[in-house]
Amino acid sequence: MSTLTHWFSQVCSVTQLSLQTIPERKGSSAAAAFGIAGVVAVLVGVLSIAQGFRHALTAAGDPGTAIVMRSGATSEMMSGLARDDTRVISDAPGVARGSGGPLASPELFVIINLPKRSTGTDANVPLRGVEPAAFGVHEEVHVVEGRRFEPGKNEVLAGAGAAREFAGLTVGQKIRVANNDWTVVGIFTANGGISESEVWTDASVLQGAYRRGDSFQSVYAKLASPNDFQKFKDALTADPRLNIKVVRQPDYYAEQSTAVSNLVTWLGTLVAGLMGVGAIFGALNTMYNAVAARTREIATLRALGFGGSPIIFSVLFESLALAVGGGAIGAAAAYLAFDGFHTSTMNFQSFSQVAFSFRIGPNLLAQGIFYAALIGLVGGLFPAIRAVRLPVATALREL
């Protein structure tokens, strides 16, 4: 038998013996496993908020769609474009064309107050004014209840997320906007994207209600091909009549999601890190107790010729098994409790609410279990080292 095979055989034998003794320490073992489960559940649950928010802002991102705003604007709220500007943008090279003309959608973006269904407190909700071309540009938008609004009337379409989170957005109801009553005539979905957090209406009606003249804040342009973006951008930025910036839709929404998702990720990691320190001490205590309970057994194995490294690996593997088991329990609990949970939060870039769902995917579950494994390895390292440093003669005399 080769040296490596002999070593591996010792590792397997000692590890098997170590795992068989876990039921004898079920109290401390369960405490350590469930402590780690709690850490993983918190980590996965908090990070699912950031994942869901990021998905809401990027789900509708189409690399074949460009957004045009005033130069220097960081969001649609900060932008402004005249009607003449939107005509020049619509006629730019690279814009796709449909049966009704260029697939370019001049849009107006305002904030209205609606009460949250859960708390009754007012929240900022985006109200977007669009023209008929918008439904050709935003191909992800589908009316699932009711109908589209009619041009020239005080009618609105509510996104599914907005209708779920805010009161008054049920088909047939009226909401009060700019001292006028507006009838909700339909509900639309947008593949879970940010548009579902918005309310849409006819741009000309909204301009009149808010005394915006014939102005807009952005133009969404459907390109003939994603490869036409640079041609489209160069033509517009070189036009002396315009003072604009051009970005791809996915890039714009990714930037919009950065502030909130980074904040939530940082806070979640901080909380999980602090809890992880406590879990490490729990694992240390459990594994030190395991080593103490197996003092004579370990000494006997050393006296029979078992090396120190197989002993170390057996203790580490036991700690790892408890940690991964606890991590799997925590990840499963977080998935069952949080995945798909609906809520809304403020998007600091637009100062409006974004309705979204918590999202827990395979990558996030794997991240949680990896964190549990790391806690287990750290928690088992020092007890493993202590196990091989026990004097054999002294340990054999212990009761």
Image: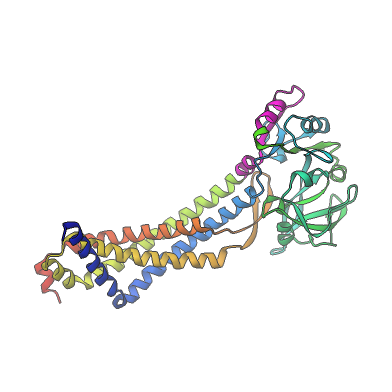
Whether 238 is among the magenta residues is yes
Which quarter of the figure is the N terminus placed in? bottom left
Relative image position of residue 124 (x, y in whole percent): 72, 52
Q: Residue furthest top?
A: 240
Q: Is residue 383 left or right of residue 84?
A: left
In the foreground, 49 or 63: 63
Give the x, y percent position of residue 84: 83, 30
Question: Which residue is located at x 30 percent, y 66 percent?
Answer: 318
Q: Residue at x 32, y 65 (%)?
A: 319
Is residue 76 highlighted in magenta?
A: no
**Residue 87 place in picture, x, y as percent:** 81, 32
Q: Which residues are magenta?
A: 229-256
Residue 385 placement: quadrant: bottom left
Residue shown at 40%/67% (left/top)?
325
The percent position of residue 154, horizontal first and vertical second, equals: 88, 51
Identity of the residue furthest to the right in this view:
152
Q: Main secondary structure of the magenta part?
A: helix
The residue lying at 57 percent from left, 58 percent from top is: 359
